[in-house]
Image (cartoon, coloured by chain):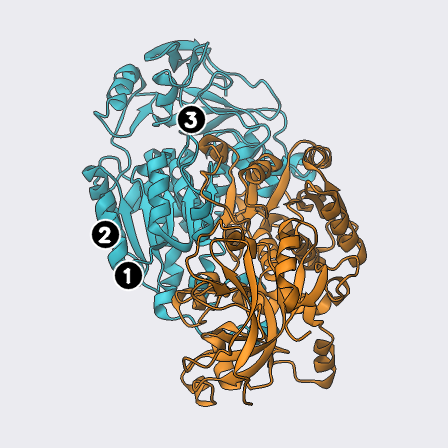
Chain colours: A cyan, B orange
Amino acid sequence: MSLPETHKVVRLYPPSHDIRVEIVPTPKIEHADDAIVRIIIAGLCGSDLHAYRGHDKFANSFVCGHEFAGEVVALGESYSETAAALGRPPLYATLKVGDKVVAPFTSSCSECHFCRMGFTGRCEKCLLFGSQRLSGGQAQYVRVPLAGGTLFKIPPDNVKTEEDITQWKHISNASLVLMADILPTGLFAATQLLQHPNILPALKSKPFPVSLYEGNQKAAVGANIIPLTDVDKQLTLAVIGLGPVGLCAIVSLLEQLESNKSQSTRIVAIDLLESRRTKAAEIVKKIGGVPGNGLFKTATIDEGKKIVAEWTGGLGVNAAIEIVGHNDALELAFELIRPFGVITSVGVHQNHQVPLIGKGLYDKNVSLVFGRCPVRTMFPFALELLLKRQDIFGDVGQETSLIDRVVSIDEAAESYVMFDKGLCGKVLFDPWK
Amino acid sequence: MSLPETHKVVRLYPPSHDIRVEIVPTPKIEHADDAIVRIIIAGLCGSDLHAYRGHDKFANSFVCGHEFAGEVVALGESYSETAAALGRPPLYATLKVGDKVVAPFTSSCSECHFCRMGFTGRCEKCLLFGSQRLSGGQAQYVRVPLAGGTLFKIPPDNVKTEEDITQWKHISNASLVLMADILPTGLFAATQLLQHPNILPALKSKPFPVSLYEGNQKAAVGANIIPLTDVDKQLTLAVIGLGPVGLCAIVSLLEQLESNKSQSTRIVAIDLLESRRTKAAEIVKKIGGVPGNGLFKTATIDEGKKIVAEWTGGLGVNAAIEIVGHNDALELAFELIRPFGVITSVGVHQNHQVPLIGKGLYDKNVSLVFGRCPVRTMFPFALELLLKRQDIFGDVGQETSLIDRVVSIDEAAESYVMFDKGLCGKVLFDPWK
């Protein structure tokens, strides 16, 4: 396929607030591992605003956007059947021009130590799309470095039957934009919570430390084990921050708790904004509530504290997900958890000292898990969820959608202004409209 | 057995530094769940010094000591075969006068929510031995509340064969004092590290998140999995603080890594004091080094940083155990770990704000696990280790022993003075000498 000489992009100029839609040369293969992707749809994300507002300083203009879905239109020389024999990621052997793909918000090689471990968000070669170092996806075309490690093919190569392929075709393009960050990050937060060793006793009906009991019947004799009661196995969880990631974290929790539905989990979802609380309640209602007739309540901060106290007789929640990135949210999470509780924080924290006291952390036996989602790692699991939950995520404009509107790329400047001022929800750009 | 009217105790008087050996009435059964234990040997612990130095304020004198081993001499009415039918902890049915026992440094019921979960260090009814609320073990007799939940019988009820019983008889009484806190806490620190979801990829040769991959072959196809290399599976660990708990943490790590000896773990053990570093090296040498021809090095802080940089090419350690309880140690642990690294902190932190920055925690994807060891929960596992490693822990006075000397209880006042001034190592009291 021969590509046009030029394409349309959204470019941000320093120092801030200066968005221009421009015609520039179409990106080309620069390295053997590159792919060129024709953008189908691209997202405007809250974190695009860091540079837009001038909070992140930058000297040179760049093409914006780190959320996109598209179609492969050109591939570098690395893409061939011999790639598999070289031990490279499978896509180097199977990716073809014409394939539909999504990308994480950063490139990741899938080949370095961190990628092999599954910690792809800390890939040694990772570059952020929509930065000075790598042009973004708010454009008609984008160059994807290390594309065989970075991209995910839709449907993936293991989807072979006609029935399965048909099902994958029903994934809406708009919903695919959630894959770059929002849905994997929500799923990551939920997974880190549910896999934590301090949470396993409730899920596995075995006392802490489950890993030592497994396969060690001898030790159990002296262990004074009294069987866990239904109350012990009932998880009470808090989600703090009900933006798109928080909503995806809730959906992910409900999904993963399906296999544990004998216990009635209770979830309190906390946010200052009524509109966000309402959307959370609508989504949970549409899913059919918490598995096993569990409870779900939305709350302001004060309401949240009261609900937790009522539900747990003052003990506190087993775990809290913190998606805000502010000290207040971290302190609230600390206050809400019970001893041996877990805080999963995917909020993007800044240069503040964390407000926690050493004695408090010791006395409450607190576990904390911080950091950025390894999006590429979470892709297969997040896409299964996206496919299953098209009723929630699929249609733009429906009650539960996380996307407010799809506009022409020509409306980028106005859209940034409105989004920055909170006058609209999540906006997607169609670069061909 | 009829008990004497009076017994000898070590009592601390306010405001500080006032240790007196006194003759007082022998404790009696006060509650049906109580046991009276005749002390065989009791420990003087660093944390006894908090009150001794007047840092922990107290208004009334009390009998000191929270580390002891002894023999049951009286039991309350709860102890009978019907206890098992009531669903109470097994010891209420099996404990007999004459049994040898050890206790954690706090009582724990084994019956509340936290105890059932295995979080016995946060038992709702826990009382610290050697405090104003509960007389301690530096005495000839001690009353143990909730003894069927608190005590551990030596040997445990599952040890039945002659050969096994003989083996258990070889556990030295002095080493049993390590059970109250030191060995379980070291084992707890090691266990929390090795069971952490961010460490499992190295141990299980599967990428993060291992919990999602287990039993989900479908997802693995789109996951771009490149097999983990030997380098990925090679754990590099730091232990910060080589007091008795740090040494037990190292022994526990080596023990638990036995089952993973195909990989050559590297451990750097950091302390300011040369004498502690020397003892750590002696212990590891006696055990036969790190399983799988791994590496073990002791180091000062600066040496430790250099060793980690050399070993890991600047990446940092996978995890660090922090046993100091100071901010400096926590900062060092943060500095030493690589992205997605784990910090297990069993150091007793005070009222300081932790020195960590939100952005640093996010950017490095840091996991932290804080808090007090649930000693009662760790007992069966720690005792197995104590039994297996009598060559390390057994004999007082040998190179590797964590105990410096055993003295008569009459020497308590002088011993507190010397221990407080660092003029001797760990002291045990024999109340019958």
- In this rendering, is residue B278 above or below B119? above
Identify the subunit bearing mark 2.
Answer: A
Spatial distance from mark 2 to mark 3, Cα to Cα?
Answer: 39 Å
**How far from the left and from the top, in percent, is residue A432?**
34, 20
Q: Find residue B255 and report its image quarter.
A: bottom right
Instruction: Answer with mark 1 or mark 2, whichever residue precedes in sequence.
Output: 2
Label 2, residues with CA under 10 Å away: few <14, some 14-19, many ≥20: few
Tags 1 and 2 in contact by the CB under 8 Å rule? no
* A99 relative to A432 in the view: left or right: right
Query: What mark, if any, has residue B402 been given in the picture?
Result: none
- In this rendering, is residue A82 above or below B172? above
Q: Find residue B7 and report its image quarter.
A: bottom right
**How far from the left and from the top, in percent, is residue A193?**
43, 50
Of residue B93 and residue B25, the one placed in the foreground of this image is: B25
Spatial distance from mark 1 to mark 3, Cα to Cα?
Answer: 44 Å
Q: Which residue is mark 2?
A: A306
Same-subunit check for callouts 1 and 2: yes
Instruction: Answer with mark 1 or mark 3, whichever residue precedes in sequence.
Output: 3
Of residue A199 and residue A393, the one placed in the foreground of this image is: A199
The answer to whether residue B217 of the structure is visible from this angle is: no
Q: Which residue is mark 3?
A: A66
Amino acid type indicated by mark 1: Gly
Identify the subunit bearing mark 3.
Answer: A
- The total of numbered circles placed on residues is 3
**How far from the left and from the top, in percent, is residue A389?**
33, 47
Amino acid type indicated by mark 3: His
Query: What mark, if any, has residue A313 been given in the picture?
Result: 1
Tags 1 and 3 in contact by the CB under 8 Å rule? no
Identify the subunit bearing mark 1.
Answer: A
Q: Secondary structure at mark 2?
A: helix
